[in-house]
Amino acid sequence: MSSQDFKDWESSGQIDPLMLRLLQKKYEAVRRGESEPAIKQRKLGALYAAFIGVGAMVMVMLLGVIRGTDVDQILLNSCRSLLVFCIIGFIAGKIAEMCVHQSAKSMIYEMLRRSENSASPASGDSKIE
């Protein structure tokens, strides 16, 4: 693979240029023998857990206030819902993270496979009679 492959991919417009630049930097660093550059990744499990859990907690608090429930009961129910929905959000976030990583891997492998196929000469295309 060469830098020309990355330029070809970028000019085709099918792949995000930022993704290509990150992939190219990583590839060049590996070729030079350097360790892989650090790429900041957000953990979707923690994000989903935080948003879904806090959202559920707020909803339970609002419902408790609207219904006129005791403060102790509102806090107890909201803490329970926070814990339950944080667990649900964490599991959903982990599943989403696995799907995103698998999709990115398959896209990169497909790009590499296409570049290798286009670089190798096609044999048997012309028949001599």
Image (cartoon, rainbow, N blue to C red):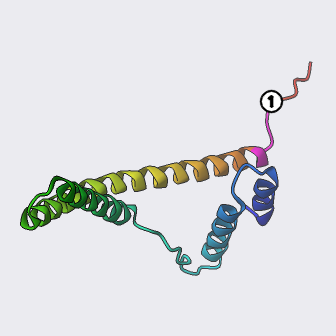
> In this figure, what is the number of numbered marks?
1
**Where does label 1 land, which residue?**
124
Tell me the quarter of the image containing the C terminus: top right
SS label for mark 1: loop
Kind of residue at badge 1: Gly
Please provide percent x and percent y for residue 80.
13, 60
In the image, is 72 to the left or to the right of 81? left
Mark 1 is surrounded, within 10 Å at the Cα level, by few (under 14), some (14 to 19) or many (20 or more) other residues, namely few
Q: Is residue 115 left or right of residue 29?
A: right
Q: Position of residue 102 (x, y in %)?
A: 47, 50
Most distant residue in the bottom direction: 34
Q: Main secondary structure of the magenta part?
A: loop
Is residue 120 shown in magenta? yes
Q: Is residue 99 above or below residue 19?
A: above
Percent position of residue 55, x then y: 31, 59
Q: Residue furthest top?
A: 129
- The part of the chain drawn in magenta is 118-123
At x 27%, y 62%, the residue is: 58
Q: Quadrant of the N terminus?
A: bottom right
Q: Nearer the viewer, residue 127 or 69?
A: 69
